[in-house]
Image (tube, helix red, strand yellow):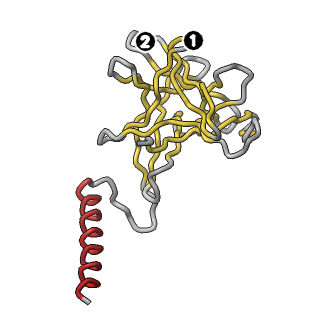
Amino acid sequence: MRSVINYFGWIILFFLTFSGQAQREGQYEIQSDELQQFIWHVKALHPEGYTLDVKAFDENGNIYDVKALEDSNQKYIMEIKAFVREEQLPVKVLVSEEQYKPVAAIDNEGKVYAIKAITKNGSTLEVRGVRKSGHIVHIKAVADKEIFYGVKAISQKGKLNDIKGIKMYDKRSELNLNGIEVHAHVVALPQIQ
């Protein structure tokens, strides 16, 4: 009987420890019957240790924010969205014959917004799907033919998640979104340790 009490005591202690830690971090304040979202920044990591802003560009050169959205129901798979005017547009890897597949936001009318990283001197690097491993497309900022910078989601508290393309099917095209062929869905995932 004593071992059973000790066993349940450890379980209760474990639960209280980790639930208290989540409350101390203050990451979530779940409101009744509402989905709360937390916004993470999307950045490219330069090998010299600084970050590059990742933005969406329209055909006129206008620049829009690209963010990762974490919701209060789950935090492991985060959608990547471009904030264009009043809309949150989905970001996708597009079907292409090119070696490195373009990454873009797509609006309701099929307009495409190229996703790029902005360097210190104001030039831009294309963000592309550069390699595929099974159902994962590795997304990088392309600095040169063989020089790539990782693209990450960064929380307000400094946590990092990897930005990846996810394929649900083995086919070249996942879906047609407003007239645009999509190769993979772009999400933020926890880094593999």
Helix, strand or loop at label 1? It is loop
Quadrant assignment for the C terminus: top left
Report the front residue among 63 and 149. Answer: 149
58 left or right of 22 in image: right
Give x and y (percent) for residue 60: 58, 17
Residue 164, by quadrant, is top right
Numbered tag placed on residue 21 in the rendering: none
Give x and y (percent) for residue 124: 49, 15
Report the front residue among 32 and 101. Answer: 101
Graded by Cα atoms within 10 Å as few (under 14), some (14 to 19) or many (20 or more), the crowding at tag 1 reads: few
Numbered tag placed on residue 122 in the rendering: 2
Report the front residue among 123 and 160. Answer: 160
* First reached walking from the N terminus: tag 1 or tag 2: 2
Report the front residue among 64 and 96. Answer: 96
- In this rendering, the answer to whether 2 lies above or below 168 is below
Give x and y (percent) for residue 20: 24, 63
Give x and y (percent) for residue 166: 61, 41
Residue positioned 38% across, 19% down in the render: 47
Q: Which residue is mark 1?
A: 145
Q: Name the amino acid type tagged 2.
A: Gly
Residue positioned 73% across, 33% down in the render: 180
Q: Name the amino acid type tagged 1.
A: Lys
- In this rendering, the answer to whether 53 lies above or below 9 is above
Total marks shown come to: 2
Quadrant assignment for the N terminus: bottom left
Residue positioned 70% across, 33% down in the render: 110
Q: In front: mark 1 or mark 2?
A: 1
Whether the residues at callouts 1 and 2 have beta carbons within 8 Å, the answer is: no
Alpha carbon distance from label 1 to label 2: 20 Å
Residue positioned 44% across, 44% down in the render: 190
Graded by Cα atoms within 10 Å as few (under 14), some (14 to 19) or many (20 or more), the crowding at tag 2 reads: few
Helix, strand or loop at label 2? It is loop
